[in-house]
């Protein structure tokens, strides 16, 4: 009867080789060519004889002839009894291949050589492969606790001989109990070192080149770490500047499972980087420090199903500049009135700070604190402008600092507010012009307007008569205006601006040109500013004396700023 791989079968093969006609049968022996015979594979047996041998031998199994073999011994004639006899002159070896179908016998067989049972038999073991699918029971992956008992069972099915079973946990050999030929058990007293480890049942068999293994689930031996979270990367109350970057690391050693960690800053759960490894819980919190972290705590919390609960925290001290959070809105003014503007400051750290007001006109600082009235009240800084005039137009800048730069490296923190008029003009010119009889004469008056005028029609030239009445003056005149760079006086400075020049040109043919004049610059709503000047006519043949308003060598031009409050008349002049 033939069996497949894995079938349990033991065959005791008692093999006796007897040489027919030998008088020295005891010299015959049977040996296997291998230590074992493997089920369902052919097997070699070798039979040896001594000096005297017969010419043939046979193999028998349970008395049945299996095969007959002829020897290679020579025939020799002897005189004794006048008989021929066969014998070998040297040791002779006979090898027979036993087919797998012959040795695969469920009950085993006795093998004899020529039926002579006096020869000592040899025992040959036939090996059968066990089932490679081991069975391991006793643990289902549930939660365990230290000092708890756990028994594991391992079973190997079939084989000849049975597989040899052994145990290990986490790579460490363990002493099991093989309580019968195909079963083994392992009794454990659990401890923390077994947490997360797998226990392995290993089966070994002579047929297998490599052993067969089966593992348990990782042993869930829960226990809590006895360490509080450790924070590295910053020590509480160390000085920080706004804009600095930190990597705060929170670590807990031990415990199974390792704790879950989280960072909370203020009341916000933070995004972190998980850097945990086996047996070590670790997370990293990248931070870009700003003023909101000042005197704030970041807390690292740890918890686990093993009843672990731990917490640690750090507190920050952050230096940052004050901030101008509010400033008055854009304002318009009337001449001679008092105006108050203000800015509000949020303190930085340190809380002491310096504040400065400055006036900026045409990108030039024309006044600072020394010329301005500043009042401090609850971080509100008021600036009072008394008797406001054209010189008060421009940007007003509130600047604060506490010697700490901001994220961009800027020390002064500022906000601006504008003070302006609906329309204003500033003139920079001599008040007296000298004309020479008989020559071409022009009057050039530089002025600066907000907003600028764009048409000749925005310029009106007027002349006073004997009754001091102003009348349009256009006779024999050419009017133009063009852009120019000019200086406007502001307090102790002159500010260069992009202005315009009003030009009145004529040929002096009469002394009636002399008199008082007024130039008006107006906007589309007929609001105007005016400039008064005087023209004098001179006969060069009679007098070479200097007249105010003319320019001679080494003379310096007189620059006068003059503004009249904007006004509107019924004539639009």
Image: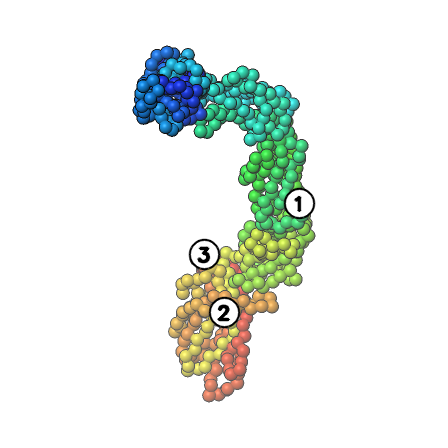
Mark 3 residue crowding within 10 angstroms, few (<14) / some (14–19) / many (20+): few
Question: What is the x, y in percent for residue 534?
Answer: 50, 74
Q: Look at 50% across and 80% down and name the residue there.
A: 551
Q: Look at 63% across and 28% down and name the residue there.
A: 192
**Which residue is identified by label 2?**
486
Residue 224, quarter of picture = top right
* Of the two numbered discs 2 and 1 in the rendering, the one whose residue sits closer to the viewer: 1
First along the sequence among labels 1 and 3: 1
Up/down of 2 relative to 436, above or below: above
Residue 119 visible in this rendered orientation of the protein: yes
Question: What is the x, y in percent for residue 293?
Answer: 62, 44
Mark 2 residue crowding within 10 angstroms, few (<14) / some (14–19) / many (20+): some
**Which residue is identified by label 1?**
235
First along the sequence among labels 2 and 1: 1
Question: What is the x, y in percent for residue 526?
Answer: 46, 58
Up/down of 502 relative to 142, above or below: below
SS at mark 1? loop
SS at mark 2? strand
Q: Which mark is residue 525?
A: 3
Asked if disc 3 and disc 2 are in contact, CB closer than 8 Å, the reply is no
Up/down of 298 relative to 27, above or below: below
Image quarter of the N terminus: top left
Q: Look at 62% across and 61% down and name the residue there.
A: 368
Total numbered labels = 3
Asked if disc 2 and disc 1 are in contact, CB closer than 8 Å, the reply is no
Residue toward you, 280 or 310: 280
Distance of mark 1 from mark 3, alpha carbons?
68 Å
């Amino acid at each position: 009867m033939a069996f497949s791989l894995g079938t349990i079968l033991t065959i005791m093969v008692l093999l006796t080789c007897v040489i027919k006609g030998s008088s020295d049968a005891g010299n015959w022996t049977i040996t296997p060519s291998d230590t074992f015979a493997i089920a369902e594979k052919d097997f070699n047996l070798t039979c040896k004889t001594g000096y005297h041998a017969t010419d043939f031998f046979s193999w028998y199994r349970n008395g049945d002839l299996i095969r007959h073999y002829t020897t290679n011994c020579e025939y020799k004639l002897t005189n004794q009894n006048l008989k021929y006899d066969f014998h070998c002159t040297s040791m002779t070896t006979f090898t027979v291949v036993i087919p797998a179908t012959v040795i695969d016998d469920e009950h085993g067989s006795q093998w004899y050589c020529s039926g002579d049972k006096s020869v000592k038999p040899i025992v040959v073991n036939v090996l059968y492969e066990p089932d490679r699918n081991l069975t391991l029971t006793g643990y289902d992956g549930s939660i365990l606790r230290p000092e708890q008992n756990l028994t594991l069972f391992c079973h190997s099915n079939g084989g000849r001989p049975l597989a040899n079973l052994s145990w290990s946990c986490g790579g460490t050999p363990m002493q099991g109990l093989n309580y019968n030929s195909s079963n083994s058990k392992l009794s454990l007293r659990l401890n923390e070192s077994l947490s997360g480890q797998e226990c392995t049942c290993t089966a070994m068999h002579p047929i297998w080149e490599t052993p067969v293994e089966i593992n348990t689930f990782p042993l869930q031996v829960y226990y809590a770490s006895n360490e509080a979270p450790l924070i590295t990367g910053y020590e509480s109350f160390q000085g920080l500047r706004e804009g600095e970057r930190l990597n705060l690391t929170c670590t807990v050693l031990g415990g199974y499972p390792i704790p879950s960690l989280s960072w909370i800053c203020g009341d916000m759960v933070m995004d972190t980087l998980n850097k945990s490894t086996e047996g070590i819980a670790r997370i990293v919190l990248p931070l870009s420090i700003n003023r909101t972290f000042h005197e704030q705590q970041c807390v690292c919390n740890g918890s686990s199903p093993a009843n672990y609960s731990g917490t640690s925290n750090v507190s920050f001290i952050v230096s940052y500049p004050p901030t101008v959070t509010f400033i008055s809105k854009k304002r318009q003014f009337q001449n001679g009135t008092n105006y108050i503007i203000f800015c509000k400051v949020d303190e930085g750290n340190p809380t002491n700070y310096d504040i400065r007001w400055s006036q900026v006109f045409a990108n030039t600082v024309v006044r600072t604190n020394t010329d301005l009235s500043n009042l401090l009240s609850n971080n509100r800084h008021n600036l009072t402008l008394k008797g406001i005039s054209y010189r008060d137009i421009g940007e007003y800048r509130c600047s604060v600092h506490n010697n700490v730069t901001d994220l961009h490296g800027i020390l002064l923190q500022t906000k601006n507010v504008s003070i302006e008029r609906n329309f204003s003009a500033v003139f920079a010119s001599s008040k007296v012009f000298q004309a020479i009889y008989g020559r071409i004469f022009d009057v050039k008056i530089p002025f600066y307007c907000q907003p600028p005028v764009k048409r000749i029609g925005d310029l009106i030239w007027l002349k006073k008569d004997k009754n001091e009445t102003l009348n349009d003056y256009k006779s024999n005149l050419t009017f133009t205006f063009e852009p120019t760079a000019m200086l406007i006086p502001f307090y102790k400075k002159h500010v260069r601006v992009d202005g315009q020049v009003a030009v009145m040109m004529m040929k002096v043919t009469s002394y009636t040109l002399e008199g008082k004049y007024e130039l008006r610059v107006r906007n589309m709503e007929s609001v105007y500013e005016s400039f008064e000047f005087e023209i004098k006519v001179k006969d060069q043949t009679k007098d070479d004396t200097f007249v105010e308003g003319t320019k001679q060598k080494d003379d310096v031009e007189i620059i006068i700023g003059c503004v009249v409050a904007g006004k509107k008349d019924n004539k639009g002049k």
